[in-house]
Amino acid sequence: MKLHIKNGRLIDPANNIDRVADLFVVDGKVAAIGDAPAGFTADETIDATNLVVAPGLVDLSARLREPGYEYKATLESEMRAAVQGGVTSLVCPPDTDPVLDEPGLVEMLKHRARNLDLAHVHPLGALTMGLKGEALTEMAELTEAGCIGFAQAEVPILDTNVLLRALQYAKTFGYTVWLRPQDAHIGRGGVAHSGPLASRLGLSGVPVMAETIALHTIFELVRSTGARVHLCRISSSAGLELIRAAKKEGLPVSCDVGVHHLHMTDADIGFFDSNARLTPPLRSGRDRDAITAGLLDGTIDAVCSDHTPVDDDEKLLPFAEASPGATGLELLLSLTLKWAQEQRGQDALPRALALITSSAARTAGLDAGSLGVGAQADIVVFDPDARWKVEGAALASQGKHTPFLGYELSGQVQATIVGGRIAYQR
């Protein structure tokens, strides 16, 4: 298929492009920017006047709920949500049922995703069998099956010796281990950020030191092994200070934050709003400000949606009993644009887009997030000024719960192109 996207504002942070230019796609690849290649005749033309044309979004954490949790969401519903939100590549954690700890399960998931022919799915394999933190998985076999890294999802490893062996194994073969820093004991059972608000509401707290103690341990193990570790969904100012120091030291670490934590604080729990029950919990205003500072100075490598669809039966409960999580695939672009608007400045939009395209792809080791000539044609075309209201009916995801319900956001996807094919058009 030959595709011509004309008159759009082309923003490609990977190649420092920000100008009005035509984009030409041939056989699933970017063929030319500006002038059409010789003999080019378009099969389809998209008029992108007053629209932004950017690389398809790369989401570093999206739970698709298959296999095992189809009552919460299906692969088909969440892949449709992805392309409706402009996401063309997504990384899914291994905490399905059964856990992604065997090559056959990974191959089945990849096969199902390929048959749907929507976004690219990149699974993380389980670091330990059944995520039990005891026996290591066959990482080499899982990598052959299509895993891009290894994780424990939300299950901390109790035995530090097991984590040490896992990092030694990963270093030997050049694998990346994805860890969410969370001490296994401090804050266990907590549902909100430890602070005055949680005390007032009578909610059990998760202190910041649950994150920082885990980070200290991880950094000691990285110093010992040299393994590459990606730190998932950092939530605190103190945690970011430790990561900033580790990067300055030259440790091979990267990190991301969840998009909800760019905007919200524990105050947004309000009167026990279970939609704001997230993992890690929403923290203080100081922590939120530190996240912005970390994004601006490069300490934070990427922003992810932390898409975790939850059904009504598990969400419409008292705050402490509700399942944590929120839908995010379709909000990732709009919430990142909202953050960019708050930063102002001429380069705010390209810098924000880098966090969910080129920088996210580089962090995950994916060949994505770029519109250079010859690159895979994964593209999002969106109207940065179009307003839309966050309502259940507007979301393709089976998960309808988000703390942003009722908000009016700007940034509406007009078309999503995956591998040169139009996967979604408004």
Image (tube, grey):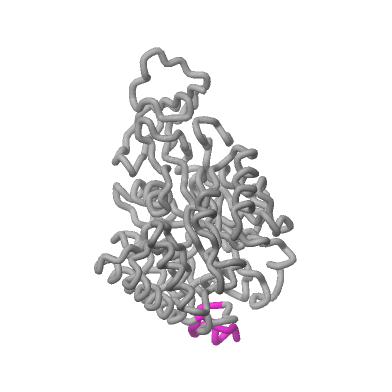
Q: Where in the figure is residue 54, as x and y percent of width and height?
A: 42, 39
Q: Where in the figure is residue 68, as x and y percent of width and height?
A: 70, 58
Residue 11, compared with residue 234, is above or below; it is: above
96 drawn magenta: no
Residue occupying the far top of the picture: 39
Closer to us: 184 or 47: 184
Residue name at image x 37 percent, y 62 percent: 228
Residue 205, compared with residue 420, is above or below; it is: below
Residue 318, compared with residue 168, is above or below; it is: below
**Residue 286 found in image quarter:** bottom left
Q: Is residue 370 visible?
A: yes
Residue name at image x 38 percent, y 40 percent: 370
Left/right placement of residue 96 relative to residue 382 reads: right
Q: Start and end of the magenta stretch? A: 192-206
Left/right placement of residue 26 relative to residue 67 reads: left
Q: Where in the figure is residue 260, as x and y percent of width and height?
A: 50, 62
198 drawn magenta: yes
Q: Where in the figure is residue 181, as x and y percent of width and height?
A: 45, 72
Q: Is residue 394 visible?
A: no
Closer to us: 273 or 110: 110
Residue name at image x 49 percent, y 46 percent: 411
Q: How many marks?
A: 0
**Residue 188 found in image quarter:** bottom right
**Quarter containing the C terminus:** top right
Closer to us: 13 or 134: 134
Left/right placement of residue 301 relative to residue 305 reads: left
Closer to us: 183 or 356: 183
Residue name at image x 46 percent, y 77 percent: 161
